[in-house]
Image: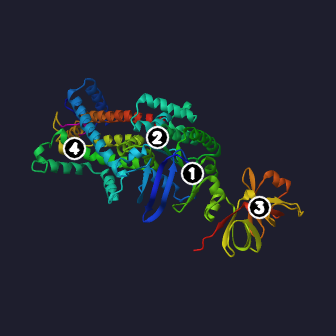
Amino acid sequence: MVFGYWDLGGVKMDLILEGIKKAFWLLITFDPEVMGITLLSLQVSGTATLVSLLIGISVGTAVALSKFPGRRIVISLINTGMGLPPVVVGLFVTIFLWRNGPLGFFRILYTPTAMIIAQTVIAAPIVMGITLVAIQQLPPKLRLQILALGATRLQMVWILIKEAKLPLLAAVMAGFGGVISEVGASIMVGGNIKGYSRVLTTATVMETSRGNFDIAIALGIILLLMAYFINLILTQIQQRERSR
Amino acid sequence: MNESKPILEAKNLEVRKGGTIILNVPFLLIPKGEILSLIGPNGAGKTTLLQTLSYLFKPFQGEIFFKGEKVNANHSVFEYRRKLAMVFQEPLLFDTTVFDNVASGLKIRRMKKQEIRRIVMEHLDQLGMGHLSHRSARTLSGGEAQRTSLARAFAIQPEVLLLDEPFASLDPPSRESLIEDLERILRQTRTTTIFATHDRLEALRLSDRIAVMNGGKILQIGTPGEVMNHPVDEFVASFVGVETVLTGRVIKRNGGTFVVSISGKEIEAVGEAHLGEAVILCIRPENVTLSIHPSKEATSARNVFLGKIVKITSLGLYQKVQLHCGFPLVAYVTHHSLEELSLREGKEVKVSFKATAIHVVRKKEK
């Protein structure tokens, strides 16, 4: 990467313009390091989103459809979990994966795997909470109608999930949005190791602290664009379902 | 008489909700091919009975037999449910096309695509929805949506069809049109049907038998004629449309008839009753004749009174005339008669009804 510079007394607009120019340059030339960071961001956050979808949709649906003692408490926990501070998640995952910690023998601290775990813990409650409401919002007799059509319990759950596809797509976007932009936990459990566990957010923090504002802006723009395009695709799917 | 085997039989069915018994049906037998309607006010237990019969609701106790075999509620109850179909008051369609909705029951049964296509189109056409098969369920009118729900039920070719007030949310023209189509399909396919309604005219029109329910119990079950003309108690009488229900005591007996004293007037009725017995007289409003002829010409009606018109209400095709003859009485007259006789509120008219037109309910003294 090229040496950055900053001018105390100069026009602030320069920083931003330089950043945009740098971003295009890095993209057009497919700068290998930037590409690597971007790819890793997608891999880590993508995997975390997928796993949290699996966990989130199944738990959310199960809680929405069953009655059990303490249900209200579980729902409060899920709703609290939706706003869980990522640094707290980072702290607990670090403790668990620490050398002498309970899961230390896996030796996955400071690896992308640890980042995936932390991001899943952040995204799963978000998906759970939205799924819970989405399923609860379906007409109460719909469940009976599906059973009356001869569905097994599993078939019924599947059909209900399909019926809630609009809010569930929102859950995917919320989950992904939450983790692609996450930095606290990712730095704590990933270590921001060059070429290994460095993602767009953690790299931006590092470049900013070094004063390399142009590179930081470049990474920030790439992050924004990526988030925008992925959400564009998901929104298209969601709104296409809506207008069918 | 009826040689068909019972297709559905329920014994000692009891459903509880939070300790209270909301359904108590000791015995119910439905022969194959019968159309049975359940009528009763809201909360009578009609929906509970329908849902319990399909094990959508778990009974506190009781057994259900399908074609003679006991249904096991704990093991693969969905296999039993696959022989039934249920349509609710709301269409409860899925957020997809009309075609996919009607196909959903078949997809659940893992039928092949080509088979599904053939059956779905057949049933959509049967209900006049063939041309709308590609439409999204969200864009349908109330009537179209309910037709789709019915097509979805018929597509699985159920052995028993359960309908829970399916026409209650429709506007009159849609309702009329759908009832006609349903009637035609049921007569053609001879599907055993149980349907709940609070519209007794619907019940009269479609059913082979009517069951009147209240408070979770079946008060009376019989052919429309039996239930309408021989209600077993006051509640059934008032529910099936007997507008005049009078209580009194027997004061005279004359062979095959007896006289009841009601508010100082004497009404003659046919039947067996003891002197001093408390009875309820049910007079259907269609059997009450009004006239303004002052003559004392002999008629075959034994009960003739002078009455004052208290209120006239329009019921569409005919008029409901409420009178006071010493006791309250309700008569139905045609619009034509209303005009011919210049009936209006406050007018005095001659009221008559035959002794044979009175249905007597002998009150069981506790």
Chain bearing tag 2 is B
Marked residue nearer the N-terminal end (3 or 2)? 2
Label 4 SS: helix
Q: In this view, does B312 lie to the left or right of A233?
A: right
Front-lying residue, A165 or A216: A165
Q: Is residue B346 above or below residue A158?
A: below
Distance Cα–Cα, label 1 vs label 2: 28 Å
Residue B56 can be seen in this image: no
Chain bearing tag 3 is B
Front-lying residue, B249 or B310: B249
x then y, percent, for residue B350 = 83, 63
Q: Residue furthest bottom?
A: B276
From the viewer's perspective, is the residue at label 2 or at label 4 nearer?
Answer: 2
> Would you name the residue on which mark 2 appears?
B94
Callout 2 and callout 4 share a chain = no
Distance Cα–Cα, label 3 vs label 1: 31 Å
Q: What residue type is labelled 4?
A: Ile
Residue, x 80% and y 62% (percent of image)? B301
x then y, percent, for residue B74 = 35, 52
From the viewer's perspective, is the residue at label 4 or at label 1 nearer?
Answer: 1
Residue, x 57% and y 36% (percent of image)? B127
x then y, percent, for residue A44 = 24, 37
> Would you name the residue on which mark 4 appears?
A117
> Would you name the residue on which mark 3 appears?
B354
Label 1 SS: strand
Residue B279 can be seen in this image: yes
The magenta-colored residue range is: A197-201
Are there few (<14), some (14-19), or many (20+) residues within 10 Å of tag 1?
A: many
> Would you name the residue on which mark 1 appears?
B37
